[in-house]
Image: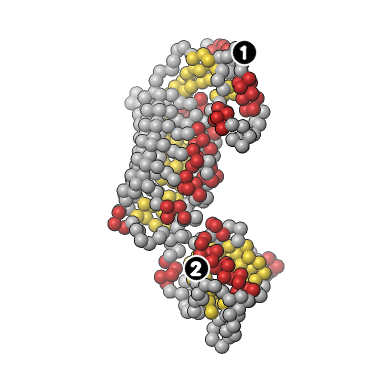
Amino acid sequence: MRLPCEVEVLSRHLPVLGLKSRGKGVRAVVSLCQAPRGAKAEPGDRACLLVSTMKDKRGTRYELKENIEQLFNKFVDEGKATVRLKEPPVDICLSKANPGNLKSLLSAVRMAHRGCDVNIPLSTLTPAKTSEFENLKTKMVITSQKDYPLSKSFPCSLEHLQVSHCRLARVDMRMLCLKNLRKLDLSHNCIKTLPATIGDLTHLQELNLSDNHLKSFSVSLCQSTLQKSLQSLDLSKNKLRALPVQFCQFRELMNLTLSDNELIQLPFKIGQLKNLRFLAAARNKLTKLPCEFKMLSLEYLDLFGNTFEKPEVLPIVKLQAPLTLLEFSARAVLSHRILYGPHIIPFHLCQDLDTAKTCVCGRFCLDSFIQGTATINLHSVAHTVVLVDNVDRMEAPIITYFCSLTCYVNSTNMLK
């Protein structure tokens, strides 16, 4: 059995000598091999581990029987594991391996350590070929249908995959097995929906879906592990009309491109994107900006070509007197930051709390509020601003909420 991966062999004597390891793996082929001729050939004795690299294709051999101190396999589903040997006292750190093949290798290594007969075919002690290291490529760019792999799988070590102009109608499930992927570019295709399993790419930092046929963005994707990893998202040139409230759970997002869609509003809780620095939403159908837009701190903002309306003179009044029990409870939960979720309260109440408005005074309101429209200078939220239209405007209408008549009156007096 031969496993392409990255390997770092760490000597446990280094810390004692006051030395540090390099901290970076090299491309290698790890093989479970038969012992060389002349050695014992009993079933439990003949398996050894061979680590071959481009510089040393013959490889270094490590005995396995009763020689494993510990196996670390907590992150085996991410293609990572460590084999700690007794003699020599080294840790063989494996990464960027195919998770399925890595599990098979570890199982066989464990059996060899116990002296049992290994249940997979053993390789011979032959030097690794250069072609075996080519499977460890970290970047692949495909820009035409004729180059798209139909029968072969994608190299499991890929960190950057671009598949553009291939007329893909859906995301290829083989891509979702690339656990090391950090950048995925599927622009200029015909993708209509996104599978929730994209959220299983735990290291994904950049996702480009521009120029496709997307009409919606799933809530499940917003609630996936991408919340902690995704930093750049390009959804331009699609057919999106709205984004879910949960979209703003991408708290690590720094670059967001939404230009050339059919959006009539930006995400309601967009102010929660504290790390956002680049926002482009040009040529949509935006008429107003959400209340929390003023909480952003951007370096670049492009809202050109939207149909912004003039601020409304008369407010929309939806005050309740007296407040309902639901309103009281919702305000209390949000002001005291009480944790909630569908495992605690009904799902529809969670949705209500997620869409609560924020008054200019900082308090929250659910169904009892006054809605007005003000004007925001876009330079107050962004250092560089693209003109809103062709008449040099740097302002746009923004929705404002007031939790009570007192807040509304006080705010009006301040403006005067």
Colouring style: secondary structure
- For mark 1, what is the residue? 322
Residue 214 in picture, x, y percent from top left? 38, 39
Q: Earlier in the sequence, mark 2 or mark 1?
A: 2
As drawn, the label of residue 241 is: none
Three-letter residue code for mark 1: Pro
Asked if 53 appears above or below 191 in the picture, the reply is below
Of 3 and 279, nearer the camera is: 3
Residue 239 can be seen, yes or no = yes
* Nearer the camera: disc 2 or disc 1: 1
Three-letter residue code for mark 2: Leu
- For mark 2, what is the residue? 3
Asked if 98 appears above or below 191 in the picture, the reply is below
Which residue is rendered at x = 44% and y = 68% of the image?
133
Q: Tell me the SS state at disc 1.
A: loop
Q: Cα distance, mark 2 to mark 1?
A: 69 Å
Which residue is rendered at x = 52% and y = 11% of the image?
416
Left/right of residue 187 with respect to residue 361 in the rendered view = left
Residue 238 in picture, x, y percent from top left? 36, 38
Of 366 and 387, nearer the camera is: 366
Q: Tell me the SS state at disc 2.
A: strand
